[in-house]
Image (tube, rainbow, N blue to C red):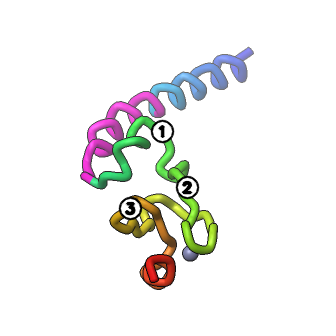
């Protein structure tokens, strides 16, 4: 019976710590002014980043690494942006 009480107490502490972490982390995540971050600001995990496809080779990569040209197409590298426009 003591073991059950101990488990309940441990679970309560874990839940309390997670709530504390969430409330503290909420203030930090508002920093950063990237134009690509605007659409994904609501996502909870920083690893769940939006993926885009290169207009030249079709490779998928994180939106934060994307290079866009004047027409709005995105590329994986400056080299592919140059090859696509020529
Ligand atoms: Zn590419």
Counting every numbered tag in the picture gives: 3
Disc 2 or 1, which lies upstream in sequence?
Answer: 1
Instruction: Give the alpha-carbon distance from disc 2 to disc 1, as whole Å.
Output: 16 Å
Q: Residue at x 25, y 52 (%)?
A: 33
- On screen, 56 above or below 43? below
Q: Residue at x 37, y 52 (%)?
A: 36
Residue 51 numbered tag = 2
Task: Provide the major secondary structure of the magenta segment.
Answer: helix
User: What secondary structure is found at the residue carrying circle 2?
Assistant: strand
Front tag of 1 and 3: 3
Residue corresponding to mark 1:
44
Neighbourhood count class around disc 1 (C-alpha, 10 Å): few under 14, some 14–19, many 20 upward: few
- On screen, 21 above or below 86? above
Q: Position of residue 37 (x, y in %)?
A: 37, 49
User: What secondary structure is found at the residue carrying circle 1?
Assistant: loop
Instruction: Give the alpha-carbon distance from disc 1 to disc 3, as whole Å.
Output: 31 Å
Disc 3 or 2, which lies upstream in sequence?
Answer: 2
Q: Are marks 3 and 2 in contact (CB under 8 Å)?
A: no
Magenta residues, as a range?
A: 18-33
Residue corresponding to mark 3:
71
Q: Position of residue 66 (x, y in %)?
A: 44, 66
Instruction: Using residue 1 as the reference point, say whether residue 55 is left or right of it.
Output: left
Q: Quadrant of the N terminus?
A: top right
- Give ligand 1's quarter of the image: bottom right
Instruction: Give the alpha-carbon distance from disc 3 to disc 2, as whole Å.
Output: 19 Å
Q: Is residue 78 magenta?
A: no
Front tag of 3 and 2: 3
Ligand 1 neighbours mark 2 (CB distance < 8 Å): no
């Amino acid at each position: 019976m003591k073991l059950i009480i101990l488990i309940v107490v441990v679970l309560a502490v874990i839940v309390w710590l997670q709530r504390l972490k969430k409330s503290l982390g909420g203030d930090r995540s508002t920093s950063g002014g990237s134009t690509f971050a605007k659409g994904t600001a609501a996502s909870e995990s920083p690893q769940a980043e939006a993926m885009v496809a290169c207009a030249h080779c079709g490779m998928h990569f994180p939106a934060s690494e994307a290079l866009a040209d004047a027409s709005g197409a995105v590329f994986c590298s400056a080299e592919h942006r140059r090859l696509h426009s020529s």
